[in-house]
Every structure is written in C-alpha cells, then in structure tokens.
Amino acid sequence: MEHKIEHRTEYQILLNKFAGNNDLYKLLEECLLEEERQRESAYMISGVYPERRNTVMKLMTDLKFNEEREVK
C-alpha cells in the first residue's frame, strides 16, 4: 500500500509542475493522435476492424480517403 501512496504523491507533484503547460498538452495530443493513426493504418492493412473503433479517428480517416478520391 505504501508504494501506491508514493506513486500518487509523485504523480500529484508532476501534475502540479506541468499543469498549464500548453506545449505539454500539445505533445500529449500529438502522441495520442499518432497512436490512433497507427491503429487505423493497421486496420486498413489487415482489413480487420475491431468491434469498438474510435469514431473520431474513423471519421478523420474516411474524410482523408474521400479527399484523396476527389483529387483523382
């Protein structure tokens, strides 16, 4: 139990340190988006989509495909 308390304390210290850091927010957002993009790519390559798919990333992917079709 003590380890859990230490972790929470360290987490809170770091949370306080970085709260309001817009660059950090942007970096986290980019990391999340990149992870979702990689998943979408894997789904497209395999042709197998999960039962529960991130609908925002699905929309972004579909919009990109439609844009590419219109250009051709």
Image: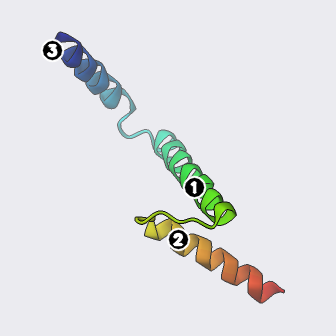
- Rendered-image quadrant of the N terminus: top left
Nearest the eye: 13 or 64: 64
Query: Above or below — where is 7 with respect to 69?
Result: above
Q: Which residue is mark 1?
A: 39
Query: Above or below — where is 66 with respect to 9?
Result: below
Question: Which residue is rendered at x = 62% and y = 53% of the image?
Answer: 38
| Picture coordinates of residue 44, whole percent (x, y) | 65, 65
Q: What colour scheme does the image use?
A: rainbow
| Picture coordinates of residue 2, whole percent (x, y) | 17, 11
State if disc 3 and disc 1 touch (CB < 8 Å): no
Secondary structure of residue under mark 2: helix
Q: Which residue is mark 3?
A: 1
| Picture coordinates of residue 25, whole percent (x, y) | 46, 45
Nearest the eye: 4 or 16: 4
Taking the image as shown, residue 54 lies to the left or right of residue 43, namely left
Nearest the eye: 56 or 18: 56
Question: Which residue is rendered at x = 54% and y = 55% of the image?
Answer: 36
Query: Going from the N terminus, do you reach mark 1 or mark 3 first?
Result: 3
Question: Which residue is rendered at x = 55% and y = 45% of the image?
Answer: 31
Secondary structure of residue under mark 3: loop
The amino acid pointed to by label 2 is Lys
Q: Which residue is mark 2?
A: 58
Circle 1 crowding by C-alpha within 10 Å: few under 14, some 14–19, many from 20: some
State if disc 3 and disc 2 touch (CB < 8 Å): no
Nearest the eye: 16 or 44: 44
Secondary structure of residue under mark 1: helix
Q: How far is disc 1 from disc 3 in space, using C-alphas? A: 36 Å
The amino acid pointed to by label 3 is Met
- Rendered-image quadrant of the C terminus: bottom right
Outermost residue toward the right? 72
Query: Going from the N terminus, do you reach mark 2 or mark 3 first?
Result: 3
